[in-house]
């Protein structure tokens, strides 16, 4: 662990009502997951590694692809930058995932910093599970605000209950003009729900929850750091269009995903 970085080991306690909200809606807002001091420390670190990853890209926003205009995306940071490891592998964040996903043991999929530049386009509606070659459709993402993040800046918005839909997930990756909102069946709420986040606030959403953002209409970079988790025992789908994902490399079809890239980060006390 890098010296002078907070370890993030103290638990974040979830009330039963919060777990129920997540189960019903497929997402939840979690205030002050990190303190101001913790947020400041990790923001400095993550700013530095994002700069290191992107320093050779001198293109203007207008020169980038539509996807790149929506996000500056830097993933799998913890294995390349030791200073990020305390964040990505923290027991506090993993404990939230464990409790919300109702898992005995929670494993890491990967981390990613998601920065949206001023003027950056919105992120199109999608479900994350379309990117993960998992037979068992249970995984989730914590999204931590490193600075204030408002709806005007492109804070995430969610479709309540959409994680309960039996999605044909291979057709719903992020792309322009995605039809996913048109595919929501009658009986499911389609009201968008979003949150203005203070530094250190977080959201957690299920891998099947539809979510998206509006453009960043501010003059500030929207800064978020995410970690994706799945319960121990989730099996690999070799027939997925994402079967080549390196986080499951070497796993046989139908076998649990348990590579060196997927350490157990939190276990339920018994």
Image (spheres, rainbow, N blue to C red):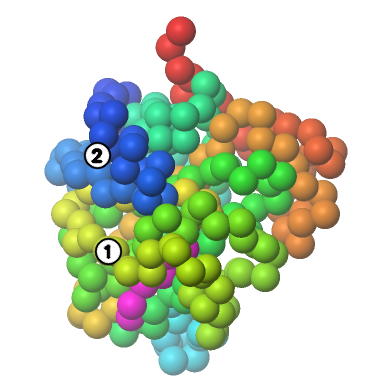
- Of residue 232 and residue 80, the one placed in the foreground of this image is 232
The x, y position of residue 7, in whole percent, is 32, 28
* Residue extending farthest bottom: 62
Local SS, label 1: strand
Is 137 left or right of 241, judged from the image as shown?
A: left
Name the residue carrying label 2.
33
The x, y position of residue 265, in whole percent, is 49, 27
Placement of 235 over or under 242, stated as above or below: above
State the residue at coordinates (27%, 54%): 145
Name the residue carrying label 1.
194
Q: Main secondary structure of the magenta part?
A: loop
Question: Crowdedness of circle 2 by 10 Å Cα count: few (<14), some, many (20+)?
Answer: many
State the residue at coordinates (31%, 43%): 21
Q: Gap between marks 2 and 1, in whole Å?
A: 17 Å
Placement of 215 over or under 243, stated as above or below: below
Q: Give the range drawn in magenta.
A: 210-215
Q: On the image, which quarter does residue 19 sit in?
A: top left
């Amino acid at each position: 662990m890098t010296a002078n970085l907070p370890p993030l080991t103290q638990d974040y306690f979830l009330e039963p009502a919060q777990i129920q909200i997540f189960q019903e809606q497929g997402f939840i807002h979690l205030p002050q997951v990190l303190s101001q001091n913790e947020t400041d420390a990790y923001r400095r670190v993550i700013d530095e590694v994002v700069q290191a990853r992107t320093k050779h890209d001198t293109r203007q926003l207008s020169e980038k692809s539509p996807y790149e205009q929506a996000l500056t995306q830097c993933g799998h940071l913890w294995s390349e930058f030791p200073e990020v490891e305390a964040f990505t592998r923290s027991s506090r964040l993993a404990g939230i995932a464990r409790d919300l996903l109702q898992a005995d043991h929670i494993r890491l999929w990967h981390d990613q910093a998601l920065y949206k530049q001023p003027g950056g386009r919105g992120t199109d509606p999608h479900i994350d599970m379309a990117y993960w070659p998992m037979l068992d459709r249970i995984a989730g993402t914590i999204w931590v605000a490193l600075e204030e993040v408002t709806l005007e800046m492109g804070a995430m918005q969610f479709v309540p209950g959409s994680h309960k839909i039996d999605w044909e997930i291979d057709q719903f990756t992020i792309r322009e003009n995605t039809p996913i909102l048109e595919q929501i069946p009658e009986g499911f709420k389609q009201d968008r729900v979003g949150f203005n986040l203070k530094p250190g606030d977080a959201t957690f959403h299920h891998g099947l929850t539809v979510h998206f953002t509006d453009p960043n209409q501010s003059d500030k970079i929207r800064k978020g750091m995410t970690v994706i988790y799945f319960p121990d025992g989730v099996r690999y789908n070799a027939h997925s269009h994402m079967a080549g994902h390196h986080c499951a490399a070497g796993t046989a079809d139908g076998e649990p995903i348990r590579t060196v890239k997927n350490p157990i980060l939190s276990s339920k006390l018994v």
